[in-house]
Image: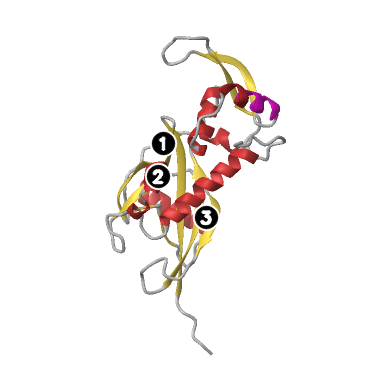
């Protein structure tokens, strides 16, 4: 019988947000080899007595200081050679989104933590350690798809928001501008996405008509009765 090779399990946590009209990801700078000083998705090895989501939350806090984030599994990555260390390393990637960038700090295996423009990082995948460019790209495509068929977009904004702010989420994630009129029509056809609060808010400049404010129609992320498609 052939001996089974040693296998280690890690978790990686992709955290995305929209800031100043751009999709951003929380990344760290590695403090140790392999890939010292390269950018990486926060993560690390799973302890022997630890469940995967628990490990993901722990590693996120240790490397970035971020707490209280609900993560969900994205995909598993286990190609031979994806990690240069002697044992084979399988990573279970997790995903979460935030309504705004939170304060972060590098810690544990990370010398620095910060928010990075996703499009710029993916244009230069060599900046990322391991196969983290692939993981980040998969996470972005997953979010793009979920914006079409679920209420995930409301997780990127605050408790109350204008339709232009919500449209900004779709534009940042999909990477292209949307016609405001067509977008509002699609949102109004999708009853399970938002509801009006009856309140308004002036623009930051104080000019123009006050914008009507909305909130998520239901707590959490759920499927939409009418998808909001990219086409």
Asked if the stretch drawn in magenta spans residue 190, the answer is yes
Image quadrant holding the C terminus, namely top right
As displayed, is residue 107 above or below residue 104? Answer: below
Q: Residue at x 40, y 37 (%)?
A: 102
The residue at the point 49 percent across, 81 percent down is 4
**Left or right of 205 on screen, residue 198:** right
Residue nearer the viewer, 107 or 2: 2
In the image, 103 versus 209, the foreground residue is: 209
Q: Which residue is mark 1?
A: 101
Q: Earlier in the sequence, mark 2 or mark 3?
A: 2
Marks 2,1: beta carbons within 8 A:
yes
- Against 92, residue 176 (above or below) is above
Residue tagged 2: 26
Among the 4 quarters of the image, the one containing residue 19: top left
Residue 158, visible in the rendered structure: no
At numbered mark 1, what does the secondary structure look like: helix, strand or loop?
loop
Label 2 element class: strand
**Mostly what secondary structure, the magenta segment?**
helix
Q: CA distance from mark 1 to mark 3?
A: 22 Å
Choose mark 1 or mark 3, whichever is in front: 1
Per the image, the residue denoted by label 3 is 53
Task: Give the alpha-carbon distance from disc 2 to disc 3, as whole Å.
Answer: 18 Å
Residue 3, percent from left and from top: 49, 85
Q: Can you say which quadrant of the picture contains the N terminus? A: bottom right
Expressed as whole percent of the image width and height from the top left, the position of residue 200 reads 55, 14
Q: Position of residue 47 (x, y in %)?
A: 45, 64
Q: Is residue 149 visible?
A: yes
Q: Are marks 2 and 3 in contact (CB under 8 Å)?
A: no
**Which one is in front, 178 or 91?**
178
Q: Which residues are magenta?
A: 184-191
Residue at image x 54%, y 57%?
75
């Amino acid at each position: 019988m052939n001996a089974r090779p040693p296998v280690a399990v890690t978790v990686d946590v992709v955290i995305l947000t929209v800031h100043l009209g751009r999709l951003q990801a929380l990344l760290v700078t590695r403090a140790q080899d392999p890939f010292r000083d390269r950018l990486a998705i926060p993560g690390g090895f799973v302890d022997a007595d630890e469940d995967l989501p628990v490990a993901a939350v722990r590693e996120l806090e240790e490397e970035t200081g971020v707490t209280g984030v609900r993560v969900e599994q994205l995909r598993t990555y286990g190609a031979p050679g994806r990690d240069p260390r002697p044992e084979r390393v399988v990573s279970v990637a997790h995903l979460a989104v935030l309504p705004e960038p939170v304060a972060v700090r590098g810690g544990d295996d990370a010398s620095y933590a910060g928010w990075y423009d996703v499009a710029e990082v993916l244009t230069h995948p060599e900046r990322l350690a391991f196969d983290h460019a692939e993981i980040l790209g998969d996470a972005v495509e997953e979010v793009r798809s979920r914006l079409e068929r679920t209420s995930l977009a409301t997780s990127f904004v605050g408790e109350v928001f204008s339709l232009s702010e919500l449209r900004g989420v779709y534009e940042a994630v999909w990477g292209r501008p949307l016609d405001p009129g067509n977008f509002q029509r699609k949102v109004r056809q999708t009853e399970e996405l938002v509801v009006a609060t009856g309140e308004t808010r002036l623009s930051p400049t104080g000019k123009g008509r006050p914008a009507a404010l909305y909130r998520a129609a239901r707590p959490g992320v759920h499927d939409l009765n009418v998808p909001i498609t990219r086409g």
